[in-house]
Image (cartoon, coloured by chain):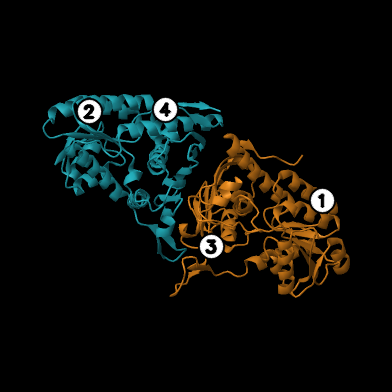
Chain colours: A orange, B cyan
Amino acid sequence: MSSPERYRVLALSAAKHDYVPLAFKDHPRFQVVGVSDEPSAAGWVHECNEQLAADLGVPYQPGIDAAIARHRPHVAVVSSEAARHARLSVRAAEAGLHVVQDKPMTPTVADADTIVEAVERAGVRFLLWNRNTQPAIEEARQLVNAGEIGEPRAIHVDFFFSKDAGVLLDSDEPEEVPDNWLSEGELTVEGIYPLAYMRHILGLDALRAFGRTSAHFFRRHAERGVEDIATVSLEMERGVIGSLCIGRIGQPSHPNVGELRVHVIGSAGALVIAEPRPEVAVYTRGQTPEDPRNRRTDEETDRRQVDLLVNALDTGGDTLLTARQGRHIVATVAAALQSARTGRPCQVSRPG
Amino acid sequence: MIGLALVGCGRNAAALAAAAAASDLCELKVAADVDPRAASDLARAADAKSHVGDLESLLDSDADDVQAVIVNTPNDSHADIALAAIAAGRHVLVEKPLALSADAADEVRRQAGRGDVRLMVAHTLRFMPANVQVHRALAAGELGKPGMLRSHRWLRRFPGPPGGWKHDPARSGGLCIHEAVHEIDQALWLIGERPTHVQAQAQPDLLQIHLGYESGAMALCGVATGLPLGSGYYSLALIGSLGAAYADDHHNVQLVFRGERPQAVVTDQRASGVRAQLDEFARAITQGREPSVSGADAVAALQIAEAAAASSASGQTAQLTETGYVLA
């Protein structure tokens, strides 16, 4: 069957972020046709969905089956609360839609397994949204693949990022936790990005994880028992040593949007890559401490990810981050969190 | 001026001699080595006397000139030379590790405590200018409570032949004892707390140490010793509850263009660190106080390094006890 001139896209919830569906807005091979969600979704979720529909200039129609029947989409873009990811993605796959899904893939490995099973049974493509098309990450991958540093032996990712999460732990200030705050830990939610870098650059999976986590900064993290910082040691395929330090470390605690770095050690050399580069520094009178001074210059990162998706859809090939690869990242995070609870290294589970 | 005898004129000796030459507090009087040429070359360059032979004769013959000994020999001789110097009433600055085991190091510490001599161990990372600034910010309360320490330290391949002592774990102690004591001491210094457990992964020239603390703090430190680097690479991030500090070569590179790809050049801060370390040793002697890196600090680092080695060998986590560790 020939590929359609334009793939019709249905956004399934914009509870979490709008940037995933918006990445399809002006792409010549996609047409966003509508926004939908479960009627039972929370009120604030419906408000997010209505806003996204207005931004895209498309209708918002609660009731997923009806929206699918109305728009006959090829692709579902799922950006709901993580707890509903598996349900919505499985539902889309069972309806024969390719699935693009926001982070984290799922809160549990079991949920990720249901997605893998559903998309493979339906024969549809699945893309877990990621940042692997950042120019610096692509460059690292190309250098490694070209053999510039010999055989990879270790990979270390430092992933410290901006934005506060409410009041600090020791603060006396009152805090109202917003409705859309979903009580998820930072390794759980953001860990997909650095772990996907490792997968993308080396093509290797983690086998065993040792983790430490802490709610070191923010009261809402501590009260909900979720982490804002974490360290993870990894034993990877082919004897490669891996590690990840990750954290939402507070607005003042980094020079710019974050300190995001990849270190790769090979048998013949090593790389140190700053993920946000290339960037431009902009300093103006009146900047607040929250304003980023450094801004990325590449505006095509999401576009390239969508281009690669087009290729996967047209050819039936793999996406940039498949359901199985995403599932392994979920399992790696789960192993690290279990290790943090038990104090012992944990195996990363494989699909049954 | 404190008169110094430098015992061991191989690798690192030139940096120590240069530090002594730049110091207003001490001067190199004797360069000693079992290799006559190494001793005479360094002695000539440093305008010092050379000595070849046993330590006892050196200390007897130069009793008036030499108040302190720098031990810069292969690791498996550190403790014995330090003990001999202490027995002869000399202050001692010992290259890390103080000994090949925590118990042996503790014996040196005890002997130094019995005599009126200062014992310092060269955990040089504490004196690197960038790290000094990080510690200063931490001590001033600017960073709040430490939550995470992340470090990367990459070194050139050991230049010696494959059969050299650094390649022999029986003589060097292996990577955990030989190199990771630096990272462990640094973590003790910056986190300010003894870890409760350690998980380590090691290969002959790669090491990763993961430390956990009762307070919830964590440290993850990597060392690589097999790289064909033009110089070393060092990166440290200390994340505190109120702020963070980054002592990091990647932030400080200069570029050189010579027709092909641009090359990154990092200003070497090591010489400053070695000089600051030597001055601290000399001040501690002059002021009759404990050096800022004591024998007890070295013993503490070695205890954790031994646990790291056991963790790496077994794949298990080492839970630290008051006197050692258990694997869990």
Determine whether label 4 and label 3 are within 8 Å by CB: no
Comparing labels 4 and 3, the label whose residue is closer to the camera: 3
Chain letter of disc 1 in the image: A
Q: What residue type is labelled 3?
A: Pro
Q: Is residue B96 above or below residue A327?
A: above
Q: What residue type is labelled 4?
A: Ala
Q: Where is residue A7 in the image (x, y as percent from the top left)?
A: 80, 68
Give the residue displayed 58% in from the left and 47% down from the top.
A223
Q: Is residue A76 above or below residue B127?
A: below
Front position in the image: B157 or A256 = A256
Which residue is label 4 attached to?
A: B170
Which residue is label 1 attached to?
A: A118
Q: What residue type is labelled 1?
A: Ala
Which residue is label 3 attached to?
A: A276
Label for residue B85? Answer: 2
Q: Where is residue A287 in the image (x, y as percent from the top left)?
A: 46, 71
Front position in the image: B144 or B113 = B144
